[in-house]
Amino acid sequence: MCEQDLQFSPPRPSSNSPHHSPGPVFTLLPPPSPESPWTLSPLQTPSPSILYHCIASLHRHEGNIYSIAVSKGLVFTGSESNRVRAWRQPDCIERGHIKASCGEVRAILAHGNMLFTTHRDCKVRVWNFTVSDNFRTKKVATLPRRSSFLMFPKLNSQQKQHRDCVSCMAYYHAEGLLYTGSYDKTVKAWRVLDKKCVDSFLAHESNVNAIVVNQDDGCVFTCSSDGSVKIWRRVYRENSHTLTMTLKFQQSPVNALALSTVFNNCFLYSGSSDGTINFWEKEKMSGRFNHGGFLQGHRFAVLCLVAIEKLIFSGSEDTTIRVWRREEGSCFHECLAVLDGHRGPVRCLAACLEMEKVVMGFLVYSASLDQTFKAWRIKVMPEEKICLDFTERMSADSKTMTATATTKRMDYEMSPVLSPSWVEKKIKNNYFQ
């Protein structure tokens, strides 16, 4: 996704602070530093339930990173160049790269030893890679196949290939189906085994920005700049897809989706340009998705989402990454931390689990429009332990506990605010000059 294609949001106050002045909050901040047009957020008081730190930070001089994928101990990054780079987890030592002759890499998806990449020519490349002493790759397919232009009439070949940027992908493991969403408003399903497009349908009235698949039942979820989230179900005998539900709660463009399936519970999250994260819970009996509420904290557009276990990571135009945890057996979500190491909008995220004996560990990778790529190590304490610690602390010193809770609440209410000069450029539709 190009910078000019991003769906940005107007400045807005945080809903967590009812007495917040409705005026332009950015006027209260000191002028931005000469090195960057962004102003960093205030330092957060660490939550007692989470520990985190940045373990690697790389600056890419050639341009922005568009997408990140993780598999087999490697992190892959796609950018404005024609190279996909592979980095070793967790220290981000470069292991090698894949060079394509078809321009910038817009989206990346990894599954096992397969890597899918989309490019400027609106096609998808499929690669096999091996992880050993030497990083090796082999291109196994181009979707659609090059020969299709010779085998089919011109009209048919246009139906098989996307007509605009391929912005997102999802892979259904059980059936070996690759789903691609595009700015041409369509979604296509490709059978990777024989490299055929088995279905193509008009999904939205505007750009398709994100797509995810439920690996349990094969349902496909899409979101768009038209402000809607849609659920599609595959009709197996016909190799077609039918619309089963449309979820639409706001006029703001929807930029990101994430699906969380833990212990037979299924939650769908969507990130919007108004800074909110809506979520829906799936009914176990009917299979319907009911709106459960929304998470507020980001002041500007939510550009990327990742769900893993009971955690949700959200990256935003406000330069921060928020870590949310869903309470077991309920729809309550807690913001555990705000990571504010970037100086520009957080464009993409990826995460993987890193188990430990006492705490649950995660590795999170982020890329921003400040041309930096960062790796974070996050450790989350069990919910039971936190409740016990809170109880003991309350018994020992209720005043200290109240002060700590107040400080923590104030910290999360003080979301990052962009600098006046950046906002002025944004209003003029001239974001990055």
Image (cartoon, grey):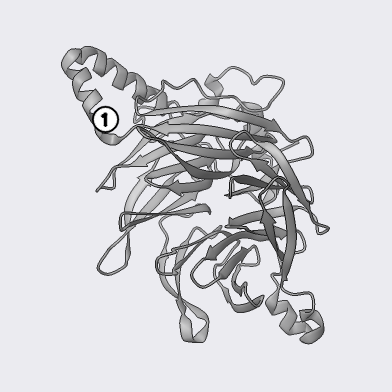
Instruction: Kindly state the secondary structure of the residue where label 1 is placed.
Output: helix
In the picture, measured across the screen, residue 370 lies left or right of residue 277, that is: right
- Which of the image's four quarters has the C terminus? top right
* Residue 61 percent location from the top left of the image: 78, 34
- Which quadrant of the figure has residue 110? bottom right
In the picture, measured across the screen, residue 348 lies left or right of residue 395, that is: right
Residue occupying the point 25% across, 13% down:
400
* Residue 293 percent location from the top left of the image: 33, 49
The amino acid type found where label 1 is placed reads: Lys
* Residue 227 percent location from the top left of the image: 50, 58
- For the question of whether residue 136 can be seen, the reply is yes
- Which quadrant of the figure has residue 418? top right
Residue nearest the observer in this picture, 78 or 72: 72
- Which quadrant of the figure has residue 287? bottom left
Name the residue at the left extreme. 395
Give the number of callouts: 1
* Residue 169 percent location from the top left of the image: 59, 61
In the picture, measured across the screen, residue 35 lies left or right of residue 180, that is: right
Residue occupying the point 75% across, 48% down:
97
Residue nearest the observer in this picture, 220 or 432: 220
Residue nearest the observer in this picture, 241 or 406: 241
Residue occupying the point 46% across, 81% down:
235
